[in-house]
Amino acid sequence: MLINLLTALPTLNANLSVLYCDNNLLTSLPTLNANLGILYCGNNLLTSLPSLSSNLQRLVCNNNQLTSLPARPLGLRTLNISKIKYRFYHQYQIH
């Protein structure tokens, strides 16, 4: 697996709809904008996630150090939070 060396991200553009920041050394993410529909942030060192956009449809944040999760957006269709420390992700079940 290729690892990048990003440790932080700048403020996100308000029109950004897809963010891929996998395989870095990120410990946190900036505030996510309302238009964000897809977020891939797996294989980092994240311990938490910022509030998620109500428009978010796909969230992939596997292989992190997450100890909590924000409220699940109602429109979320795809979720991958495998191999994380957070043990109570049953509240994220998609029905």
Image (cartoon, rainbow, N blue to C red):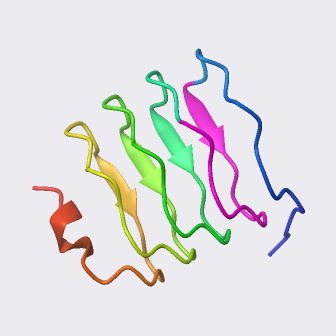
Q: Is residue 10 above or below residue 1?
A: above
Give the prevailing secondary structure in the magenta stretch. loop
User: Is 22 part of what is drawn in magenta?
Assistant: yes
Q: Is residue 5 above or below residue 62?
A: above
Report the side of 86 relative to 84 (left or right): left
Considering every residue shown, the one lying at the far right of the view is: 5
Where are the magenta residues, as a range?
17-31
User: Is 23 part of what is drawn in magenta?
Assistant: yes
Q: Quadrant of residue 88?
A: bottom left
The residue shown at (31%, 84%) is: 87
The C terminus is located in which quarter?
bottom left
The residue shown at (48%, 73%) is: 66
Report the side of 26 relative to 78 (left or right): right
Q: Quadrant of residue 47?
A: bottom right
> Who is closer to the viewer here, 27 or 91?
27
Report the side of 91 relative to 10 (left or right): left
Residue 86 position within the rendered picture, expressed as x and y whole percent measured from the top left: 38, 79
> Who is closer to the viewer here, 55 or 48?
48
The residue shown at (62%, 49%) is: 29
Residue 28 position within the rendered picture, expressed as x and y whole percent measured from the top left: 63, 57
Residue 43 position within the rendered picture, expressed as x and y whole percent measured from the top left: 66, 70
